[in-house]
Amino acid sequence: MSASDPASAHHRPGSALSGAFPVIMIAVAAALALWVGFGRGVAGLLGSLTPVYAAAIGLPILLLHVIAAALFRRDALSYPSHAMSRRGMLTAVASWAITLCFGFFLPDSTAHGMQSLFTHTVGAEYVELSYGFVNIFGVLSVALAVALVLLALTDLRVTARRLRGEPLTEDERLDRLEAHPRGLDAASDADAAGAGPAPASATSSSRERP
């Protein structure tokens, strides 16, 4: 990458995991969609609501996670490290955990009444408790999936502003402090290393200013 390339003017620490994370997101999203739609099958609890759960809940969750992964991947390719943002990865992991809990408490209509993996574990008399938890985790699952898409769009917008050389906002300064624990000076050093020496015309014009 040449020194004049705008992408070299900013830096995001990366690793093999952060580089591959958008692909991991797609694989996990497919597994989560199957878990929500058919996960109760591990205990033989698939019922009449299974097709509804698969189409109305599992598929939208899958689509939202795939869209977010594609946007995060697009953003990551703008950086030399090809790394996904740390906040994006943490939000994705939180979303996975919540969706796993959602599938665990989701009840299905079986020959023995409404049952979930939770009631199969602790007893059918706790089905009302299962309903309570599934409402909470269901809302959070969808909210976090939407949040992932919005966060990916935000990362794309921030990256575009950095490529245009626009000044950092307060939120972006905080993001850079998280990426560079030594402070903004370290982030500036990383940017300077990628950007290379300033053009001679810019240096001479700065000297002529009063």
Image (cartoon, grey):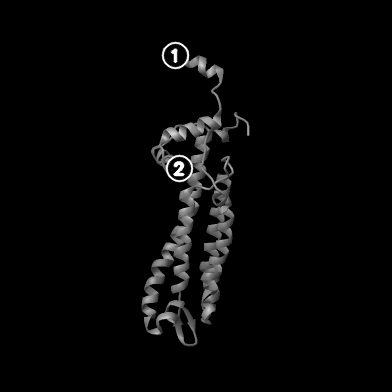
Whether residue 82 is situated above or below residue 144 in the rendered picture: above
Question: As drawn, which residue projects farthest toward the right?
Answer: 1
Q: Nearer the viewer, residue 190 or 208?
A: 190
State the quadrant of the N terminus. top right
Describe the element under mark 2 as helix, strand or loop.
Answer: helix
Describe the element under mark 1 as helix, strand or loop.
Answer: loop
The three-letter code of the residue at mark 1 reads: Arg
The three-letter code of the residue at mark 2 reads: Ala
Q: Within 10 angstroms of label 2, few (less than 14), some, or many (20 or more) residues?
A: some
Q: Is residue 147 visible?
A: no
Q: Within 10 angstroms of label 1, few (less than 14), some, or many (20 or more) residues?
A: few
Q: Is residue 34 rendered to the left or right of residue 140?
A: right
In three-dimensional space, the C-alpha distance between marks 2 and 1, rounded to whole angstroms, equals: 34 Å
- Which residue is rendered at x = 47% and y = 65% of the image? 99
Q: Is residue 207 visible?
A: yes
Question: As drawn, which residue projects farthest toward the bottom?
Answer: 112
Residue 209: mark: 1
Q: Is residue 33 rendered to the left or right of residue 184?
A: right
Residue 179: mark: 2
